């Protein structure tokens, strides 16, 4: 009887951790932008086709749909690697393997393309940033020796009229299913 109760308790705990993983991640992990990355304009016909195939011809998306669609397209196309790789979305549409920098650039290019197509680019803009990660207020990069972990890229989507900001980590979205992240307040 006690073994069965322990199993149910363990299964319930795992289920709760899974259900609340986004909230827990945002509570424990905070991001700080330390520099903006350059933008890659889309010129690849394969990338344009890939994005256009995900939307209906007259489909005007709202910001929530664009964020969701950009996440799905990025997660569907890219696979993480820690090796040397492309970061240009125009090349990634074919090569697919990249790290957090490539994920952020691909997401930004996709998001900005969809914003333009939905006539929201005069209000909203996605930008890639290199950043630092904090666990309970502690900069975790100080404890990692590899140059690969000196920073971590993420995306800020900003509304120029309302100053609303939405924080996305496409790499974490792909691997943990967490769509939004939190910023470190100074």
Image (cartoon, rainbow, N blue to C red):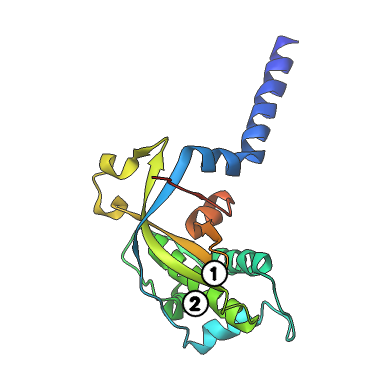
Q: Which corner quadrant holds the N terminus?
A: top right
Query: Label 1: few (<14), some or many (≥20) within 10 Å?
Result: some
Q: Which residue is mark 1?
A: 77
Identify the residue at horizontal 70%, vertical 28% (top origin). Answer: 12
Query: Label 2: few (<14), some or many (≥20) within 10 Å?
Result: some
Where residue 14 sits: x, y (%)? 63, 31
Identify the residue at horizontal 66%, vertical 64% (top origin). Answer: 64
Where residue 105 sits: x, y (%)? 44, 70
- The answer to which quarter of the image holds residue 141 is top left
Looking at the picture, tell me which residue is in the foreground, 55 or 155: 155
Q: Are marks 1 and 2 in contact (CB under 8 Å)?
A: yes
Separation of marks 1 and 2 at Cα, in angstroms:
7 Å
- The answer to which quarter of the image holds residue 86 is bottom left
- Left or right of 107, for residue 64: right
Can residue 98 be seen in the rendering of this structure?
A: no
Looking at the picture, tell me which residue is in the foreground, 40 or 73: 40
Identify the residue at horizontal 47%, vertical 78% (top origin). Answer: 94
- Left or right of 148, for residue 16: right
Q: Secondary structure at mark 2?
A: helix
Q: Earlier in the sequence, mark 1 or mark 2?
A: 1
Q: Which corner quadrant holds the C terminus?
A: top left
Can residue 150 be seen in the rendering of this structure?
A: yes
Where residue 87 sits: x, y (%)? 38, 71
- The answer to which quarter of the image holds residue 90 is bottom left
Q: Which residue is mark 2?
A: 93
Q: Is residue 91 above or below residue 183?
A: below
């Amino acid at each position: 009887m006690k073994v069965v109760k322990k199993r149910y308790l363990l299964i319930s705990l795992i289920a709760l951790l899974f259900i609340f993983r986004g909230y827990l991640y945002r509570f424990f992990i905070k991001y700080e932008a330390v520099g903006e990355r350059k933008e890659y304009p889309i010129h690849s016909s394969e990338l344009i086709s890939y994005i256009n195939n995900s939307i209906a011809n007259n489909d005007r998306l709202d910001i929530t749909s664009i964020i969701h669609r950009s996440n799905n397209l990025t997660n569907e196309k890219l696979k993480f690697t820690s090796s040397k790789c492309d970061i240009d979305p125009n090349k990634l549409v074919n090569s697919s393997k990249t790290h957090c920098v490539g994920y952020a650039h691909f997401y930004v290019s996709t998001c900005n393309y969809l914003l333009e197509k939905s006539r929201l680019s005069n209000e909203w803009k996605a930008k890639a940033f290199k950043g630092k990660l904090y666990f309970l207020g502690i900069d975790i990069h100080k404890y990692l020796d590899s140059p690969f972990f000196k920073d971590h890229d993420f995306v800020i989507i900003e509304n120029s009229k309302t100053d609303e900001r939405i924080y996305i980590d496409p790499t974490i979205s792909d691997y943990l299913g967490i769509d939004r992240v939190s910023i470190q307040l100074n």
